[in-house]
Image: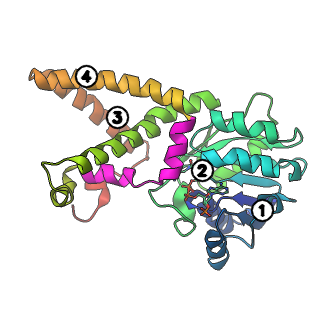
Amino acid sequence: MSAMFEKIAVLGLGLIGSSICHGVKAQGLAKVVVGHAKSAETRKVALEIGLVSEVFENPADAVKGADLVILCAPVGACAALAAATGKYLREGAIFTDVGSVKGAIVRDCAPHLPLNVHFIPGHPIAGTEQSGPRSGFAELFHHRWCILTPVAGTDLAAIEKLTKFWEALGSNVDVMTADHHDLVLAITSHLPHLIAYNTVATAADLETVTDSEVIKYSASGFRDFTRIAASDPTMWRDVFLNNKEAVLEMLGRFTEELAVLQRAVRWGDGETLFNLFTRAREVRRGIIAAGQDTAAPNFGRDKS
Ligand code: NAP
């Protein structure tokens, strides 16, 4: 594919930023890719492994002349990056991000951006529990959705160009409002992470079951929660600080459903349990049918 962009600036070179760099390189989507990261160590690694051709301590230096700028830092760091770079952006550039929350990004970044720049927030629904510049890989976005949440009135050609960019990285693209995104992701991603963190914390605090037993018998289900709960604490702290209302709404519904289950267990109501488990199984089958996970037993692991 011919280069879609002259110069891409990736601000934040962790799992998502480095995966974008690999994908851009693999597909030849830019003539030049430069980066910025907070720590000297990440900047050093980024050069060492060839994620970018140049890396800058000051984000303003990275964005100069770029026709695509992608914020790949934790949600809580994005406003400061927009503030630091806003006046150095090239006229007509696309300014986007990959943050897991969208309403707060629009609210906090937009005021810092000039009107001659196309601000199109985005969120690739792809990730692993790994983080840092060495964790990325070009295939991360393959067959995954990327959601764009442009505000009303955004230039259609710019949305189209960013859509093509994500498609070239292997994604399917959906467009929706930031508020709708935040509600959908609250149930599909944010609540499951909160539950996983809490499940692992509860097990860790148990006094009657030893730590070694928790680890020894983890294949019975606990292990899959620990994978989710191993996700980056900074990233997830910022998600819950910035998607408070939608998460509280989903948590409320979850708590009500949990009370139904609690009552069914207490009163030996097998029918309620069976019906709910059957509905849940259908959802899992739907995810596999949509190509969003493997049908292999035990997620394709060799042994349990
Ligand atoms: P990550 O691997 O922890 O990388 C974060 C990167 O941001 C690092 O390069 C870090 O620099 C940099 N950074 C942190 N604070 C910064 C600041 N104040 N100013 C500038 N750079 C800063 O995280 P990630 O998983 O790539 O997540 C990045 C974004 O993608 C987040 O907004 C997250 O919500 C979103 N996202 C994540 C996933 C996922 O599953 N992980 C999926 C979709 C979207 P140092 O290395 O120097 O600290």
Residue 98: in sight, yes or no? no
On screen, residue 170 above or below 76: below
**Among the two numbered marks 4 and 3 on one chain, the one whose residue lies closer to the N terminus:** 4
Q: Secondary structure at mark 1?
A: loop
Q: Quadrant location of the C terminus?
A: bottom left
Question: In the image, which is nearer the foreground, mark 4 or mark 1?
Answer: 1
Contact (Cβ within 8 Å) of mark 4 with mark 3: no
* Residue occupied by mark 2: 74
Q: Nearer the viewer, residue 70 or 212?
A: 212
Q: The residue under label 4 is which amino acid type?
A: Ala
Q: The residue under label 1 is which amino acid type?
A: Asn
Magenta span: predominant SS is: helix
Q: Is mark 4 within 8 Å of ligand 1?
A: no
Q: Is mark 2 within 8 Å of ligand 1?
A: yes
Find residue 195 and report its image quarter.
top left
x and y percent of residue 269 in the render? 12, 21
Q: The residue under label 3 is which amino acid type?
A: Val
Q: Is mark 3 within 8 Å of ligand 1?
A: no
**Among the two numbered marks 2 and 4 on one chain, the one whose residue lies closer to the N terminus:** 2
x and y percent of residue 191 in the render? 42, 36
Q: CA distance from mark 2 to mark 3?
A: 30 Å
Question: In the image, which is nearer the foreground, mark 2 or mark 3?
Answer: 2
Residue 226 magenta-drawn? yes
Q: Is 253 displayed left or right of 163 in the figure?
A: left
**Among the two numbered marks 3 and 1 on one chain, the one whose residue lies closer to the N terminus:** 1
**Among the two numbered marks 2 and 3 on one chain, the one whose residue lies closer to the N terminus:** 2
Find residue 2 and report its image quarter.
bottom right
* Residue occupied by mark 1: 58
- Local packing at callout 4 (Cα closer than 10 Å; few below 14, some 14-19, many 20+) is few
* Residue occupied by mark 3: 283
Q: Which residues are magenta?
A: 222-242
